[in-house]
Image (cartoon, helix red, strand yellow):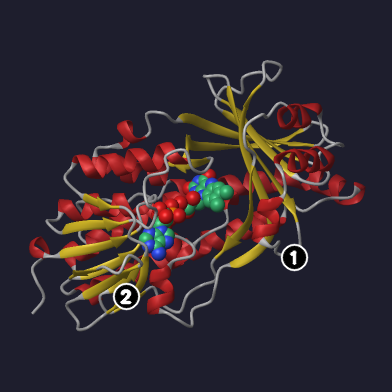
Amino acid sequence: MSAPARDRKALIIGCGVVGPVLALYLRRIGITPVIYEGRPEPRDDAGFFLNLAANGTDVLETLGIREKVLEGGHESNRLVFQNHKQKQLGENPSETVLIKRGLLTKSLREAAVEQGITVKFGKRLTDVQIPHEDMAIAYFDDGTEAHGDFLVGCDGIHSQTRRSILPNAPDPEYTGIIDSGAFTRNDSIPPTDGVMRMTFGVDGFFGYQKVPTGEIYWFENHERKQAPDRAALDAISQAEWKKKLLRLHKNDHNEVSEIIRSTDGEIGKWPVYDLPSLPTWNRGTVCLIGDAAHATSPHVGQGASLAMEDAIVLAKCLRDVEGVPDAFETFESLRRDRVEGIVEMSRETGNQKAPSNLVTRKVRDLVLPFFLKRGVESFEEIYSYRVDWNESV
Ligand SMILES: Cc1cc2nc3c(=O)[nH]c(=O)nc-3n(C[C@H](O)[C@H](O)[C@H](O)COP(=O)(O)OP(=O)(O)OC[C@H]3O[C@@H](n4cnc5c(N)ncnc54)[C@H](O)[C@@H]3O)c2cc1C
């Protein structure tokens, strides 16, 4: 007979976006969560920025922490698309909050700690064992182990939890896109008043928003068919990378090169991966959520919001469904179609950012307004998803 919810201990692997959110929901239903994070200490300045959409921020609202967690963020209420000559091609409403990644993960972690949740750093998971149907054991690289009634892998796209419970699962797949991101200040760029401006450039895609503090948050995507060697990519100097981006955008309107040129701080660069559909997201007393289960490319800005949706839905399943393995199965059946549809949509969106010649550009400029109008409906469907905490699953 498994322990009643209120006496259960949950091992949560990873204190990124979804780990603390899940911990807060589990605590609400009387389960004791402990978060194990692989990094030796918090890195609150790590990463660049992301957009949290209304379907994700609503999960924080239900916890009563929305305002506090998003304090340092900026509203982003519209996406405006333009071509390389700055001709406007269309726009989409976008109810999102633009926030620095380190700030978001810091506030989420602090919200968890404030509510008495233990977060242990320097605990890199190396393996998971399921000795019997009411238990999970986590093994860490410092030689220690932790025992719980169940374990949830919130350890991101390269999840060790996934590798441990599904050794034959597919690996993340390179999507053919390199992503860059940075912050700058530049008085010659006018404020964008809550609008994220996106440019389909000749050889790359560029987006930016100038927030009320005067800071410009920008990102760039360009195609590279073969996955780059990570060490070789990291070894490219900042000056060289900046030159490369300026070269890629030399035929685009001036704002693009102006923003890149004025960037003195670090310009981040990453190959973009997503995760092919997994055969299952759980095994016995272990479950995967967030990027560990369904990492998406960033082109529709949904990875973090979907991860937050997972947290509330999983907690409801553990609250309402008898037995942990059945709760995990119910969770997966409630989530799979939605998240995998969005992963697919994001990959297709990324493919539209490929470089263009004169003919494809002209066709795209003609048909894009039509597609954007249709896209509004898909976006509304994504953003309007809400999980009612009080409704039973
Ligand atoms: C360039 C880029 C831009 C993005 N933009 C957006 C956006 O605009 N909007 C959006 O919603 N999403 C965006 N995303 C996606 C979003 O970042 C992820 O979907 C989200 O972070 C997933 O949260 P998570 O908690 O599952 O994983 P993560 O946030 O990656 O957290 C995983 C945590 O687990 C820890 N960990 C890893 N391995 C171990 C281990 N073995 N043991 C212990 N701990 C471990 C990590 O250190 C980390 O703290 C973007 C992603 C990228 C790469």
**Mark linked to residue 322:** none
Is the residue 103 above or below the residue 212 in the image?
Answer: below
Sequence-wise first label, 1 or 2: 2
Picture coordinates of residue 117, whole percent (x, y): 20, 49
The residue positioned 77% from the left and 42% from the top of the image is 240
**Mark linked to residue 226:** 1
**Mark linked to residue 128:** 2
- So how many labels did they put on this image? 2
Amino acid type, mark 2:
Val
Picture coordinates of residue 182, whole percent (x, y): 61, 36
The kind of secondary structure element at disc 1 is loop
The quadrant of the rendering that contains the C terminus is: bottom left
Nearer-the-camera pick, 71 or 159:
159
The residue positioned 37% from the left and 78% from the top of the image is 165
Instruction: Using the rendered view, name the quadrant where residue 54 is placed.
Output: top left
The answer as to whether callout 2 falls within 8 Å of ligand 1 is no
Is the residue 300 above or below the residue 74 in the image?
Answer: below
Residue 211 visible in the picture: yes
Is the residue 326 above or below the residue 84 in the image?
Answer: below
Q: Is residue 284 left or right of residue 196?
A: left
Disc 1 crowd rating (10 Å Cα; few below 14, some 14-19, many 20+) is few
Disc 2 crowd rating (10 Å Cα; few below 14, some 14-19, many 20+) is many
The quadrant of the rendering that contains the N terminus is: bottom left
Is the residue 207 above or below the residue 161 in the image?
Answer: above
